[in-house]
Image (spheres, rainbow, N blue to C red):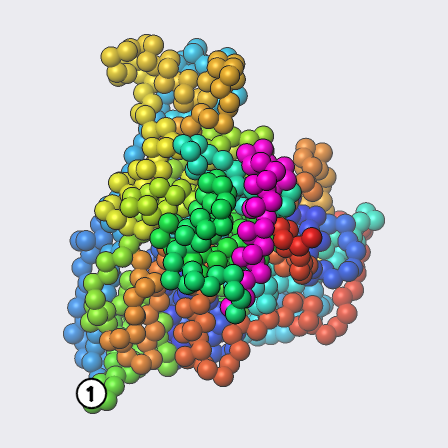
Amino acid sequence: MMSNIINNSSLQSNESFDFIFKIVLIGDCSTGKSCIVERFRNGTYNEPQPATVGVDFSIKTVCMHGKTIKLQIWDTAGMERFRTVTQSYYRSANGVIIVYDTTKRATFLNVQKWIDEARRNTGSNVLLFLVGTKCDLEDEREVELSEAEEMRDYIPEIMFVLETSAKENKNIDDVFFCLAEELKKKHDQMAILENAEEDRPVNISESKPISQCALICD
Amino acid sequence: MGEDLCSEYDVIVIGTGMTESIIAAAASRIGKRVLHLDRNDYYGGMWATFSFDALQRWLKECHNQDQKNITNFKNKTYISQDEILISCGSQSSVSNIDEQWFIPKNVPVNASENSFSKNEKNDFWDQEKIKNLSRKFNLDLAPKLLFSRGSLVDLLISSNIARYAEFRSVSRILTWYNGQLETVPCSRADVFSTKDVSVMEKRLLMKMLQLCAEYKPNGNEFKNFEKKTFADYLKSKELTENIVHYILYAIAMSSINTPCMTGVERTQKFLSSLGRFGNTPFLWPLYGSGELPQCFCRLCAVFGGVYHLKRTADSLVVLKTDMKSICKGIVSNDQFLSTHHLILNVSEAPSSFLQETFNEGLSRGIFITNRSIYSSEKESLTLLQFPYGIKNKPITVIEIGSSTHACPDGLYIIHMTCKQNTNATEDLKPAVEKLLEIEQIDLDPSHSASSGISGFAYDYEIYSGAIDMTNKENQEVKSVRPQVLWALYFNCLETSQCDLSVNVPSNIYLTSGPDADIDFEFAVKQAKEIFKKMYPNEEFLPRAPDPEELLLDDEEIISGDNNSSLTSTE
């Protein structure tokens, strides 16, 4: 599981970095997952957004304690609409951000289902984060922060809860910095336990064209 | 949820198997509006990979399938004059299911503590323990390998879908020769290091492979053998018996009846894939073959494809004229959805579309075992073509361990596949009997056969692997056969040889389920052909851009060192 953390995939071209982590976003439709990513990635906010099309994942580099950390942030590609997110979406994720809308109670009530799905499809080392969106809309609030914190206390896998506003750029960076920090911590612990680089799986997109054939060419 | 779907599409795809998923991705990639449905609550259909629990649910569903009522829609509101409604089929494609346990339901704690404390390393397996580890299993209905230079690897790379999947290379190829397992030398290094082959034979083997690799259609080497078998050709080369065996069964993956040129082509294919990713020509997808259709579905969704599981077409709306018939759309959950093209897995096709009853099938076996069929220091990923199945048809054996996420540590999964003759249990017997231990393990002395306590002890020894070097010093570890803990046999349809276009409206395309071959080549080929029929002038899965290419502004590095404003714990 941790073996793919140090994964100098071709996507990262020749820039150097110390760590790369895969983070997946889940949560009900229209909770603002893409807005969070866009605000963090580009510092911009557009409303209202159509369902996400064409965006696969975003990459943002964060510098922390002298280390360069690449965050590969994956969006659901609209597959959450009918709860049809593929299992392969979760594979080798290091962190999962579960998003609910603080102005729509139903999206909060569904958090448990998303946690179950994340548990089913991720490894035991994955970190879960709970993020409420649209906290600028105080008048329309349907979920109190205390409720989310209660949930965090009940469910040990959840590392922390944060309320955000992509519109007012509130707490967005914190979500990802904190994630990066925790993932790095986790990785440092793991690195002591196992030699992560040994026996990595094959990522075929990293392959270089090799013309020789092992058997016949002299 | 509960919201209705948009009602107009360019392509509706029903079934999320490999072929359907590739077509869905290809259509979505060039901007077509795609709706992708599957009647199941999981992806992949007969290509799916399951946890242990999910596999149990699948088995239950297979058993219940006969009782399923196909609701007959008489509702005419969807159709106008000249149009007809055709009910969709739900062909039951799985038969002869045979599930067997070889270990006790659960073992009383004191039994495992007292008797086996000396052997703590050998985890003690009972049914309960397997079930509790359900999620650690990824069991494939259709286990398949990728040739390193095969069409799927090329497609994954050229389309940029490769980033969704990870693989392990098959680490060794075994064969069954003279009543035992042997490693087939694949790479140059293998050939020179092997002890099973003499120096003279090594030269012969290399020379022979070189001839096959260099074969060009106008060459002379294979003249006069065009109508003979590959085995005839090999025999004419004055090779030794074991070299013929290696090439014929393991490298060309053929049988004594394979025509010469087919054998040469297969040998070429094998050789050309060597040395790209590992020691053998093959790759195995981490988490199972069922991941791959999902990767194509993800790409389809990224480009706007709409996904809905647990939903399918109840009926098709077909416009019939004198000359031909055309599908106008489908009725699904009381909603009419129009489409220009309809892709339908053959198991969903109305029976009137199928001209023949299918009589080809696959025999499948899945085994959970406590050790490898051929133990080695490091965990191996093994391919074996067992040559001596029923009527000399080979049985494909793939063995995977925990490093592929197929099973928990300490266990192995063995997949067997061959063409159906009678039923899976019988068809796979030749390989099962040679490779596996299928004695019932009964740890309760009172239930044990007449031998009582001693029988119990004996069972445990085989079972736990206690017969090691320590007990039988002269016996090599590798000759101890793995004990089967659980086995599943079933048969499923194989339609790759059928013409699926005969009675079908011109804009409906039927797709096959998994075929008998070891790789995904057939599914890729069928998907390409169907795509070209729908969109003859469009590119098939052009490279999807990387995220960096979509965003014009330069990536800036931001510093998070001085952030501390978190609302909550640790």
Tell me: residue B329, above or below residue B37: below
For the C terminus of chain B, the image quarter is top right
Which of the pair B150/B509 is nearer the observer? B150
Return the chain for callout 1.
B
Could you tell me which secondary element the residue under label 1 belongs to? loop
Q: Magenta span covers which residues?
A: B191-217
Q: Residue at x 47, y 30 (%)?
A: B371
- Pick the residue in front: B519 or B24: B519
Residue at 51% x, 33% y: name it: B409
Residue at 55 percent across and 31 percent down: it is B376
Looking at the image, which residue sits at the far right?
A66
- Look at the image and tell me whether residue B169 can be seen: no
Provide residue B225's location: percent of width, then percent of height.
Answer: 42, 60
Q: Is residue B197 magenta?
A: yes
Q: Answer with left or right where residue A185 lies relative to residue B515.
A: right
Q: Is residue A70 above or below residue B223?
A: above
Q: Position of residue B399 (x, y in %)?
A: 46, 40
Instruction: Where is residue B319? Give x, y as percent.
Output: 25, 84
Badge 1 crowding class, 10 Å Cα cut-off, few under 14, some 14 to 19, many 20 or more, is few
Task: Please say whether residue A5 is one of the residues in the magenta stretch.
Answer: no
What residue is disc 1 on? B82
Image position, residue B451 (x, y; %)? 28, 11
Q: Is residue B358 visible?
A: yes
Which of these two is toward me, B132 or B487? B487
For the N terminus of chain B, the image quarter is bottom left
The disc labelled 1 sits on which kind of residue? Asp
Task: Tell me: residue B437, above or below residue B144.
Answer: above
Q: Main secondary structure of the magenta part?
A: helix
Left or right: where does residue A77 sit relative to residue B452?
right
Residue located at (59% from left, 48% from top): B206
Would residue B165 appear left or right of B36 to someone viewing this image?
right
